[in-house]
Every structure is written in structure tokens, then in C-alpha cells.
Image (cartoon, grey):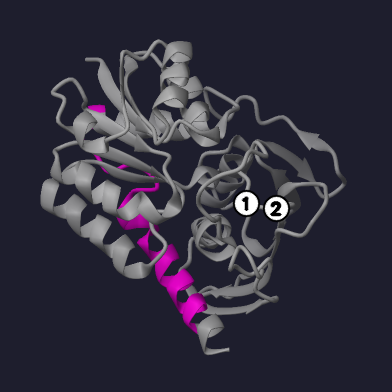
């Protein structure tokens, strides 16, 4: 069975998913949705996609669409995910699932109502580096005592991951912190019971905090410290330091190092070294096998409950 995909949002991350689809057997992109018709048509030509539209509903009405991958602006994620599910389509939403707890819950509820697969792109669960650590945890070889995480970008203007201007505003809490909040609970295998946050001044144009500091504690006592900034000039990206009872490891996307800065070979952890491809493979496998995927909407809801608590703290000053 070939799973036929509609992809909405053919920008920086949409094309990463299209590249991944091209490497996976039994999956084909058949419809592309974008705001700018001309630009979307150009991307469709590059990837051999036959149908192009600016209206998601048009793609959802097509009988040759089985599932949707949403790479649209954060503020649209939850509403569009519910729209896809109620149209009878499986859906994978790029992180974050939503920018409010109520909207995240609405996606979970819609999945339960429809029985379709609903997954969120919490890519860190799938990066080979973090998978390697997770397997050590599952076998009892490692207990993570503390995570120290730095998420640093330079975005004083409204640009995407490719440095191109965009029409919506990113968010340190609801987008970038979501990766770490979810991963921390996942890796220590214990729910978050305490969470605190501080933020710097609000940007006068973008309307968001450009710097943020978050502290987390799990029920088993494990700690996490997360520093985030849009003011950092480099190096860019996210570094995860795992401090454990039997070793220290540093992960940067798909690469992993030990505490002595020696690289660990993680090439045999999974069938690819590309976290987004592995994430997509899980989505398609869950559809084929009729099961809940890793990083399902229901599984990641606890992350958004914590983000909601942190937002309330920050709003209260």
C-alpha cells in the first residue's frame, strides 16, 4: 500500500519532509499546500508533486490523500490538525502541537473521536544521538541525573531556519522549549513535577522575549536547566548535556559525544542518521500498523501542560 501525502507549508521545514519522503519506500507526496501559489508551484515542480493549492480544504477533499504533514505557522497547527482529522486524514504536525494548552487538548480530543493517527514532530525523540541515550536508559545502563540544555539562535529579525523573511513569529517557550521539556521527561522516564521560568525584555517589534531560562524537576528527582536565546551570534543550534550515574554525553542534533569530547558512532542506531526522516518513518509505520506512534498527540500533551504552567508564571511576573 502506498501512503499518499499532502504537505502543507512548503518552506524551510516542509522541504526537509519532502526530502525525507523521497527516501522512504511506499510513500508519495501527491498534494502541496502553500500561501504563495507561484512559490508553491515551483517547489512542487522540484519534487514532482502533481497537485498544488493555497487551500488546505481542497487537499483534504481529495480521495487520493491519506495523510497530511503540517509545516505551517505555529498559530495554525492545532486548528489545521483538527481539520485534517475530521476530514478522515492521518496527521503529523510539526512542533509545536499548539501554542496553548486548550488547543493541544483539542487535537488530542479530535484524535480520540476519529481514531486516526495524530503525531507531533518532537524530533529529538528520533535523533540517533538521543535514541542512543534512551536505549541506555531503557536497559538500566544509564540513569540521567541532570540535563543541561542550550538552545541558541540569532533572530533579531523575523526569519526562518534558512534566514528568509517570514510572515509569523517564532516563540522560545511554545516552540523551542517544547523540544527539551518533552525530551527531559522522555529520557528520565519520569513526569515533570516542578517547573520555573524567567524571561528577558520583550522585543519592541517582534513582541516576544528574546532570552529565557527554565528549570525543571522530575518526580524521580532528575533536574534540567534550559537556556534559550534569539540574541546569540554563534554557535547556533541546541546542545544537550546528559549527566548520568555512569557517564556524561553531549548531543547536538544527530551527533553524540562523551564527556571527554570523543565522538560516539551512532550510525547503527537506526536506518538513517536524519532525525526528521526517522520521525516520518514512524508516522508512516503507525498508519500501516494501525497503532499509536511514538510522539503521538496524546503522549506529548504533558509537555504542553508544563509549557502552560510556565506561561502562567511569566504572565504573572
Q: Main secondary structure of the magenta part?
A: helix
Q: Which mark is residue 155?
A: 2
Query: What residue is shown with label 1?
Result: 158
User: Which residue is rendered at x = 30% and y = 56% of the image?
Assistant: 298
Residue 98 position within the rendered picture, expressed as x and y whole percent measured from the top left: 38, 58
As helix, strand or loop, the secondary structure at mark 2 comes to loop
Magenta-highlighted residues:
288-312
- Is 261 placed above or below 221 here? above
Q: Is residue 137 left or right of residue 31?
A: right
Q: How many marks?
A: 2
Tell me whether the residue at label 2 lies in contact with that at label 1, contact meaning CB atoms closer than 8 angstroms. Answer: yes
Q: Secondary structure at mark 1?
A: loop
Badge 2: residue crowd in 10 Å (few <14, some 14–19, many ≥20): some
Q: Residue at x 87, y 46 (%)?
A: 260
Q: Check the image and report above or below for 52 versus 305.
A: above
Q: Position of residue 49 (x, y in %)?
A: 36, 14
Task: Please state which of residues 171 and 111 is positioned toward the viewer in this rendering.
Answer: 171
Q: Disc 2 vs disc 1: which is toward the camera?
A: 1
Amino acid at each position: 500500500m502506498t501512503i499518499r501525502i499532502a504537505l502543507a507549508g512548503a518552506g524551510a521545514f516542509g522541504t526537509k519532509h519532502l526530502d525525507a519522503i523521497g527516501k522512504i519506500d511506499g510513500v508519495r507526496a501527491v498534494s502541496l499546500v502553500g500561501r504563495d501559489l507561484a512559490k508553491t508551484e515551483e517547489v512542487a515542480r522540484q519534487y514532482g508533486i502533481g497537485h498544488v493549492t493555497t487551500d488546505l480544504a481542497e487537499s483534504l477533499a481529495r480521495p487520493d490523500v491519506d495523510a497530511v504533514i503540517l509545516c505551517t505557522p505555529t498559530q495554525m497547527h492545532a486548528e489545521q490538525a483538527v481539520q485534517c482529522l475530521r476530514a478522515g486524514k492521518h496527521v503529523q504536525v510539526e512542533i509545536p502541537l499548539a501554542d496553548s494548552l486548550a488547543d493541544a487538548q483539542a487535537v488530542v480530543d479530535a484524535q480520540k473521536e476519529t481514531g486516526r493517527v495524530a503525531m507531533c514532530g518532537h524530533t529529538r525523540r528520533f535523533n540517533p544521538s538521543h535514541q542512543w541515550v534512551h536505549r541506555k536508559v531503557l536497559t538500566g545502563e544509564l540513569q540521567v541525573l541532570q540535563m543541561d540544555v542550550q538552545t541558541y539562535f540569532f533572530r533579531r529579525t523575523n526569519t526562518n531556519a534558512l534566514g528568509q523573511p517570514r510572515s509569523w513569529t517564532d516563540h522560545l517557550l511554545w516552540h523551542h522549549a517544547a523540544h527539551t521539556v518533552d525530551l527531559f521527561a522522555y529520557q528520565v522516564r519520569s513526569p515533570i513535577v516542578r517547573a520555573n521560568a524567567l524571561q528577558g525584555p520583550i522585543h519592541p517589534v517582534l513582541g516576544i522575549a528574546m532570552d529565557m531560562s527554565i528549570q525543571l524537576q522530575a518526580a524521580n528527582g532528575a533536574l534540567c536547566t534550559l537556556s534559550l536565546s534569539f540574541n546569540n551570534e554563534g554557535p547556533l543550534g541546541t546542545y544537550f548535556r546528559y549527566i548520568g550515574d555512569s557517564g556524561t554525553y553531549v548531543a547536538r542534533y544527530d551527533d553524540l559525544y562523551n564527556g571527554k569530547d570523543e565522538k560516539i558512532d551512532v550510525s547503527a542506531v537506526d536506518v538513517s542518521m536524519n532525525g526528521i526522516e526517522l520521525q516520518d518513518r514512524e508516522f508512516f509505520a503507525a498508519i500501516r500498523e494501525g497503532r499509536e506512534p511514538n510522539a503521538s498527540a496524546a503522549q506529548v500533551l504533558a509537555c504542553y501542560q508544563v509549557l502552560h504552567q510556565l506561561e502562567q508564571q511569566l504572565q504573572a511576573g
